[in-house]
Image: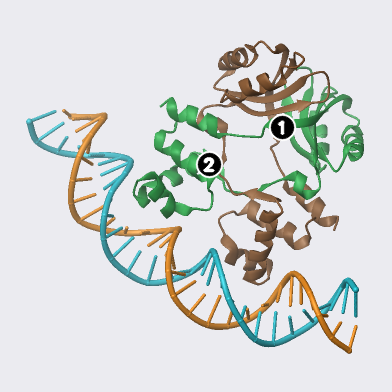
Chain colours: A green, B brown, C orange, D cyan
Amino acid sequence: MGIDALDGRLITLLDREPRIGVLEASRRLGVARGTVQARLDRLRANGVIRGFGPQVDPAALGYPVTAFATLEIKQGQGADVRAHLTTVPEVLELHTTTGQGDMLCRLVARSNADLQRVIDRVVGFDGIVRAATAIVMENPVPLRIIPLVEQAARDT
Amino acid sequence: MGIDALDGRLITLLDREPRIGVLEASRRLGVARGTVQARLDRLRANGVIRGFGPQVDPAALGYPVTAFATLEIKQGQGADVRAHLTTVPEVLELHTTTGQGDMLCRLVARSNADLQRVIDRVVGFDGIVRAATAIVMENPVPLRIIPLVEQAARDT
DNA sequence: CTCCCGCTGTACAGGCTGTCCACTGAAATC
DNA sequence: GATTTCAGTGGACAGCCTGTACAGCGGGAG
């Protein structure tokens, strides 16, 4: 169920150079091509690797502003709020968290001014009682997974 | 600088089926292969597509618990705190936000009990004054980008 | 009206993928 | 100690895709 050192090295390698392909990866790792192929198949089957979709940068799309909004939800309105937020393209992510009907969502906007429009659209819904927004100024640690992969590989 | 409808369709297609490759994509989109190749090159050059790295699921690695922690930082300790959090593998993401020395980070852990260990490690650092943690219960909208891509393509 | 740019269709060589097989070595089982 | 099982190895094959190049075409900009 976990991953071993070879799995870890493989994932790390693919993360750094996704274009290399199975054959080149086997050369870099010093194993047979079939081994890499089998490992990859297993990692995908186990759900460890979900896929190799394109990583799109919202900033390059014209949405350089990121914010996190904490939403307080009226009792029993959870499903409606979820459905509402799903329809807003600027909502990149939504979580329900511990606490009284709280949700946390990640937003992007074209500018600080545009963020106001997005927030209005997000909170302009009956089930939402209150919202607190934190605008992101810096991103010292962009979403990463490699350190965790190496930790998981070490634990084996 | 923006993207057009074809770019949008291409990104959406690659997001759904990353394995298809340039030739198959050109067939699906009804354009010449060279066009897809040129579009992809441009999207990567513009930074719209950062890469095609593997999408790893922390839960499948043995870290099914996610939490968000808001940290209050002592004046002038920002850099030190960043350096500290960078060394914690369970910190997947770190942002500095508006407000007095506030940071927001995403954490994962092996269990709710293990989350305590992670939090202790995160906040066990001088520059951190206070921490508030919200544990994720559900994830109704997983990190997504396609709706935004389609919106950006429409705006052209 | 003309230039420029992007798209098309085509061509070519090279390399990679998917798949199969027999062999080896080590760990687990009896 | 002998055997079964499993993962990895090295090799082979056909098929397809990639990277690259080039000439022709059409529309938009000047």
Residue kind at label 2, given as amino acid type: Ile
Nearest the eye: B53 or A99: B53
Residue A50: percent from the left, percent from the top? 56, 43
Give me the residue at 57% from left, 36% from top. B57
Compared with residue B150, is residue C6 higher up or lower down, i.e. above or below? below
- Chain where mark 2 sits: A
- The label nearer to you, 2 versus 1, is 1
Q: Which residue is mark 2?
A: A49
Locate the C terminus of chain A and report the quarter of the image it occupies: top left
**Horizontal and vertical percent position of residue A128:** 87, 27
Task: Please name whichever residue, B46 or B115, is drawn nearer the observer in this view of the structure.
Answer: B46
| Res A10 label | none
Residue drawn at (43%, 49%) of the image: A25
Q: Position of residue A148 (x, y in %)?
A: 53, 29
Q: Give the x, y percent position of residue A75.
A: 83, 22
Classify mark 1: helix, strand or loop: strand
Give the residue at mark 1.
A139
Q: Residues within 10 Å of mark 2 (few under 14, many from 20)?
A: many
- Position of the N terminus of chain A by quadrant: top left
Q: Is residue C16 left or right of residue B52?
A: left
Are tags 2 and 1 found on a single chain?
A: yes
Check whether the beta carbons of the residues at disc 2 and disc 1 lie within 8 A of each other: no
Query: B132 or A147: which is nearer to us?
Result: A147
Residue A78 vs residue B62, the one in the foreground: B62
